[in-house]
Amino acid sequence: MWQEFKEFAIKGNVLDLAIAVVIGSAFGKIVSSLVSNIIMPLIGLLLGGLDFSGLKIQVGDEQILYGMFIQNLVDFFIIAMAVFLFVKAINKFKKPAEEAETEAVPTNAEILLTEIRDLLKDAR
C-alpha cells in the first residue's frame, strides 16, 4: 500500500493538486480585494454613494448582513468568469495537439482499406 501511495504521489497528481490549491487561494484573495476595494465602491458610487458592506437588516437582536452577501456574489461571479476564461484558453491550446496525435496514427481498418485500394490499383 505504501508503494502504491508513493507512486500516486510521485506521478504528479498530488503535486498538481497542491499547486492548484495554493494558486487558487492566492487568486481568491486577489479577486476579493479587487471586488472589495475597486468594483463595489464604483458600483456604490454609481448608485449614489451606497456602501454595500454596511447594508443590513436588524431582526430582533440579530443582524442580517445582506450587503456582504451581495459582495460575495460579485466575488463568485468574477472568479467563475476568470476560471471559465482560463479553462477555455487552455482547451484551445490542447485541441490542436490532440488533433495532431489522432491524425498521425491510422487505425487497423484504415490500414487494411489502404492495402485493398493499392491491390485494386495494381490489378487494373
Image: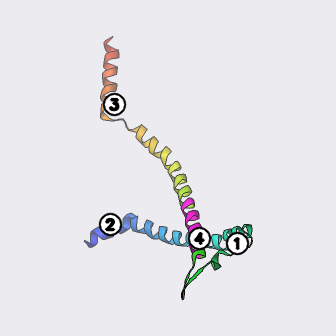
Q: Secondary structure at mark 2?
A: helix
Instruction: Write down the residue under mark 3.
Output: 110
Which badge, 1 or 2, comes first in the chain's sequence? 2
Amino acid type indicated by mark 4: Ile
Which residue is pictured at 52% across the width and 69% down the height?
A: 24
Which badge, 3 or 2, comes first in the chain's sequence? 2
Q: Are marks 3 and 1 in contact (CB under 8 Å)?
A: no
- Give the side of residue 31 with respect to residue 1, left or right: right
Amino acid type indicated by mark 2: Glu
Q: Are marks 4 and 3 in contact (CB under 8 Å)?
A: no
Between residue 98 and residue 73, name the one nearer to us: 73
Image quadrant assignment for residue 123: top left
Amino acid type indicated by mark 1: Pro
Instruction: Write down the residue under mark 2.
Output: 7
Which residue is pictured at 39% across the width and 64% down the height?
A: 13
Cα distance in 3D space between marks 4 and 3 = 58 Å
Which badge, 4 or 3, comes first in the chain's sequence? 4
Q: Nearer the viewer, mark 3 or mark 2?
A: 3
Q: Secondary structure at mark 1?
A: helix
Cα distance in 3D space between marks 3 and 1 = 63 Å
Q: Residue 97: x and y, percent?
A: 48, 46
